Image: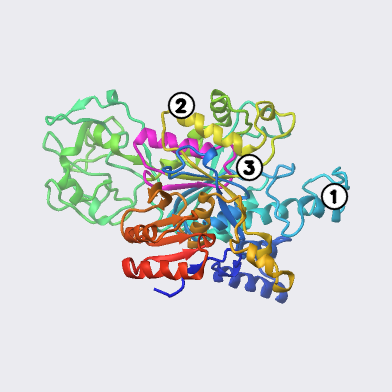
């Protein structure tokens, strides 16, 4: 262990890891622009800036909000308030490759202003004023119509860095679902192809969103889309939905008690191409032999005797002869009609048809691939459930839709992310799913603290920002189903460093240096300091927190499971030798202290010596 404790410099954004692959892509972008070669390429005004925005490290941190949380110390769910681009950057190192499912419902870009507007240096108003789009009083001079050159490019510039960062968070077997309507569906498909790769495209699912509207000119708009991509489609599990079965349909019972019915399709399918091992005799209950129509017959007249077809005129069974021999007891023989095409061993029309048995228990446990059209979860269901919770919010997606998507694959222990959380539908859906199948899914949802309109029902109900609505919706939804998992509320915020930290030496007097021994602002809570450590150390943000007392002083244990695990923090001002020894005896992976705790350098040396003797593998940090 070093003779000096490690000091965290939160202002050093260069300490953040840079995505070299992203920088290489940016270099290629400029090369293509310079060469001006004619080639197929998906680009827009602002794409280069979007690359930079995705690659630029964040200077933000996370501020804890225990007062807005439910079960703050123990919950493994995260509710993050703030710009989702900054939130995604703050999640990058801590949750790299750890998210199993992402669902987002981004702004559809219907021609109205959208909140997530990245102008890189300017505010939206400054940018619009400079381009003559609004006047100084905020009055719009040019409508945001499709003829506006920025109509699509602004939306793409907003979406690109978010999708790029989201892909990094997906596990190798993870999947992303993105809801969108016709306004940007085509552009989003091209953007997703670029970010996730065309080979990882799974489906463009059509969802019937509404049936009652008579808007539109030539067609009534009833649908939107869900674009589905895997991070690596070869590792993405097969999707499956439960079969719809009724036990009463299985009218027959075998001696062992298994219920079954006749398959809807016979063992003979005329459209099936000829295959070598699938033309053979099957013995009927009366001892006769049955074979599909054709010109060649097996030489040996016996059950299971086969012959190789000479052409597609020689028809075959659906099962190979080996499969038939193994499970011939799973066949049902019925008397055929006058048009029965099957032949007997003499080439005459057989009186028998053959059907496989379909077992009730197999169907009950079986899965079907889902259709790429979803009929069952229109927007009206989302409106109804939000009204039942007495939450003032418009255009919420139905939680049943996200639940359905979450059941397409085994996600019982997965991490679900939604960084356009809106009213909190995804969090609600995750809690419901866990209740229904005893799962242990966790959610991370991110929403902006956008102000509600002044005369809106939300404002009248006391909600000044969207995140307030979302948190309250989650609380009420949890109470309705007796879910106690809670959520840990965090807010994207500045690092909380004093402004003097960013001044040069020539701008500071000696008295300033003495006053800035503690470089943190005075209003930072112990939890805020803890999250500074977690962000800097790329540790997960949703692990258990324990408040303990040692030597009459409060310490924080974070994800501490025993020796050489987790973080132990002391942010008080009375660090005695005995307290130091007690903390060192815990042997945590990381021990953290506050700079202002130490009056003299000798105290730091003493702490280091104590840890060197008692717990040499512990990393000691001072903030």
Q: Residue at x 32, y 60 (%)?
A: 585
In this rendering, is residue 96 above or below 485?
below
Mark closer to the observer (3, 1): 1
- Is there any visible trace of residue 240 in the rendered image? yes
Is the residue marked by circle 2 packed among few (<14), some (14-19), or many (20+) residues within 10 Å? few
Q: Compare marks 2 and 3 and give the one earlier in the sequence.
A: 3
Q: Left or right: where does residue 448 sit relative to residue 414?
A: right
Please give the residue where the numbered disc 2 appears in the rendered image: 480
Q: Nearer the viewer, residue 399 or 528?
A: 528
Label 2 with label 1: CB-CB less than 8 Å: no
User: Which mark, by number, is residue 32?
Assistant: none
Query: Helix, strand, or loop for circle 2?
Result: helix
For label 1, the crowd category at 10 Å Cα-Cα, with few meaning under 14, some 14 to 19 and many 20 or more, is some
**In the image, residue 564 above or below residue 336:** below
Residue tagged 3: 181
Figure quadrant of residue 421 = top right
Image spot of residue 103 (x, y percent):
52, 45
Pointer 3 or 1: first along the chain: 1
Q: Is residue 283 visible?
A: no
Q: CA distance from mark 3 to mark 1?
A: 26 Å
Residue 392 sits above or below residue 517 on the image: above
Residue 426 position in % (x across, y down):
51, 39
Residue situated in front as seen by the camera: 145 or 456: 456
| Colour logic | rainbow
Answer whether residue 431 is magenta in the image.
Answer: yes
Q: Secondary structure at mark 3?
A: loop
Q: Which residues are magenta?
A: 412-441
Residue bearing mark 1:
133
Q: Classify residue 455 as left or right of residue 3.
A: right
Residue 391 is situated, as x and y percent measured from the top left of the image, at 59, 28
Left or right: where 489 falls relative to 45: left
Whether 283 is among the magenta residues is no
């Amino acid at each position: 262990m070093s003779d000096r404790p490690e000091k965290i410099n939160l202002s050093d954004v260069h300490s953040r890891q840079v995505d070299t692959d992203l920088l290489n892509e940016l270099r290629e972008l400029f090369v293509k622009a310079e060469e001006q070669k004619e080639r197929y390429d998906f680009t827009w005004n602002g794409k280069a800036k979007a690359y930079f925005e995705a690659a630029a490290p964040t200077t933000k941190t996370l501020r804890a909000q225990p007062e807005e949380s439910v079960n703050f110390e123990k919950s493994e769910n995260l509710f993050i308030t703030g710009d989702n681009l900054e939130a995604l950057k703050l999640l990058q190192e801590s949750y790299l490759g750890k998210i199993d499912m992402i669902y987002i419902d981004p702004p559809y870009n219907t021609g109205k202003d959208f909140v997530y507007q990245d102008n890189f240096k300017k505010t939206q108003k400054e940018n619009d004023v400079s381009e003559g789009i609004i006047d100084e009083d905020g009055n719009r001079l040019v409508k945001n119509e499709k003829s506006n050159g920025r109509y699509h490019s602004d939306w793409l510039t907003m979406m690109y860095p978010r999708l790029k960062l989201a892909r990094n968070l997906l596990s190798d077997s993870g999947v992303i679902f993105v809801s969108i309507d016709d306004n940007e569906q085509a552009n989003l498909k091209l953007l997703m192809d670029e970010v996730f790769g065309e080979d990882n495209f799974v489906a463009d699912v059509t969802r019937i969103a509404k049936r009652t509207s008579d808007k539109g000119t030539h067609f009534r708009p009833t649908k939107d889309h869900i674009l589905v991509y895997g991070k690596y489609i070869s590792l993405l599990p097969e999707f499956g939905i439960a079969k719809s079965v009724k036990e009463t349909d299985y009218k027959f019972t075998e001696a062992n008690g298994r219920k079954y019915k006749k398959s809807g399709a016979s063992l003979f399918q005329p459209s099936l191409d000829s295959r070598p091992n699938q033309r053979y005799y099957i013995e009927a209950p009366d001892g006769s032999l049955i074979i599909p129509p054709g010109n060649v017959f097996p030489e040996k007249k016996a059950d299971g005797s086969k012959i190789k077809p000479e052409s597609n005129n020689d028809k075959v069974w659906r099962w190979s002869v080996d499969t038939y021999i193994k499970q011939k007891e799973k066949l049902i023989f019925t008397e055929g009609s006058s048009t029965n095409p099957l032949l007997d061993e003499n080439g005459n029309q057989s009186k028998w048809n053959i059907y496989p048995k379909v077992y009730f228990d197999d169907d009950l446990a079986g899965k079907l691939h889902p259709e790429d059209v979803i009929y069952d979860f229109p927007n009206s269901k989302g409106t109804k459930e939000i009204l039942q919770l007495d939450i003032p919010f418009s255009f919420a997606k139905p939680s049943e839709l996200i639940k359905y998507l979450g059941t397409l694959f085994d996600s019982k222990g997965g991490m679900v992310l939604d960084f356009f959380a809106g009213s909190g539908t995804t969090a609600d859906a995750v809690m419901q799913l866990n209740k229904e199948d005893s799962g242990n899914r966790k959610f991370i949802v991110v929403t902006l603290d956008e102000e509600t309109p002044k005369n809106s029902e939300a404002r009248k109900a006391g909600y000044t920002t969207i995140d307030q609505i979302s948190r309250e919706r989650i609380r009420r939804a949890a109470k309705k189903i007796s879910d106690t998992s809670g959520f840990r509320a965090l807010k994207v915020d500045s690092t909380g460093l004093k402004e003097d930290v960013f001044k040069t030496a020539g701008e500071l007097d000696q008295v300033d240096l003495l006053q800035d021994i503690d470089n943190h602002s005075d209003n930072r809570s112990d939890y805020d300091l803890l999250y500074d450590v977690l962000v800097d150390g790329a540790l997960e943000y949703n692990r258990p927190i324990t408040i303990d007392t040692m030597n009459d002083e409060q310490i924080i244990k974070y994800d501490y499971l025993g020796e050489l695990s987790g973080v132990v923090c002391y942010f008080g001002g009375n660090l005695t030798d005995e307290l130091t020894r007690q903390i060192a005896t815990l042997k945590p992976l990381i021990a953290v202290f506050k700079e202002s705790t130490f009056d003299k350098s000798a105290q730091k040396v003493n702490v280091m010596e104590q840890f060197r003797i008692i717990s040499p593998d512990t990393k000691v940090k001072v903030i």
